[in-house]
Image (cartoon, grey):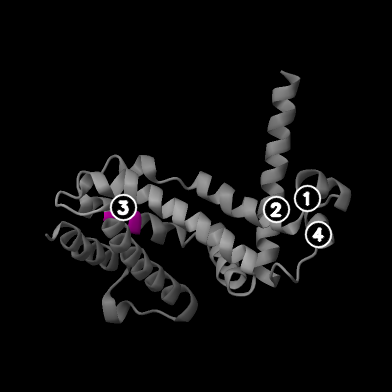
Amino acid sequence: MANILNKQKHDDQKTKFLARARHLFATHGVQETSMAQIAKACKVTKAALYHYFKSKDAILKEIFTSHAESKDVAELLKQTKDIEECLYMLGKNHLLEMTQPDHVELMKIMLSETMKNPEMRKFYIHFITEHLTALVKDSLVPRVKVPKSEKEIGMLFFQFFASLMHYSWHQMMVGDITPLIGDGETFVRTLAKTYSKVFQAE
């Protein structure tokens, strides 16, 4: 019993450290943030921080990995009846995530680090490829009722996802474009309807 409790305490502490590191990375940049600053924000010594993470890169990778594990939408998509509803739920979930401070911080880190850190770019490409490939295989392929290869479906889904990302980033980083294309709900419904027709086109 003691071991289980200790593991839970360890995991809880690690989660708190990741959240504080994520905030520092998003605010100041990864390169500009030292392990000493992270330790100070976590109210522990550097030695204690190194007990949990061997480097800043390790922290960064774990931030991405832990976020993906905690935001798994596969179960949600199992409840959808067709491709349009599946795309709508994916879009709605994405816009909801973009209202959460932790997700916004993650997106800021992703945008910044993949542009200047080759190792991080490589890691991110691998990470997003695995994530999108799993969504395509598990959630989209079974709902496409016309002959299309998994590669074709994946390419269409990436186009859908890119449109969604562009909309959410524009709203968050540039300015309100709802007078032009409608609010988030309208945009996601229209995007899902449009791409569901493309997915089902022979």
Q: Secondary structure at mark 4?
A: helix
* CA gap, disc 2 and disc 1: 6 Å
| Res. 180 image quadrant | bottom left
Q: Do residues under tags 4 and 2 come within 8 Å of each other at their CB atoms?
A: no
**Residue type marked 2:** Ala
Mark nearer the viewer, 2 or 3: 2
Residue under the image location 45 percent in, 52 percent down: 131
Pointer 2 residue: 58
Per the image, label 1 sits on a secondary structure element best described as loop
Residue type (three-letter) at the residue carrying disc 4: Met
- Front one among 94 and 158: 158
Q: Position of residue 126 (x, y in %)?
A: 52, 56
Q: Is residue 200 left or right of residue 128?
A: left
Determine the secondary structure under disc 2: helix
Toward the viewer: 96 or 90? 90
Question: Mark 3 or mark 4: which is in front?
Answer: 4
Q: Position of residue 137 (x, y in %)?
A: 33, 46
| Residue span colored magenta | 87-91
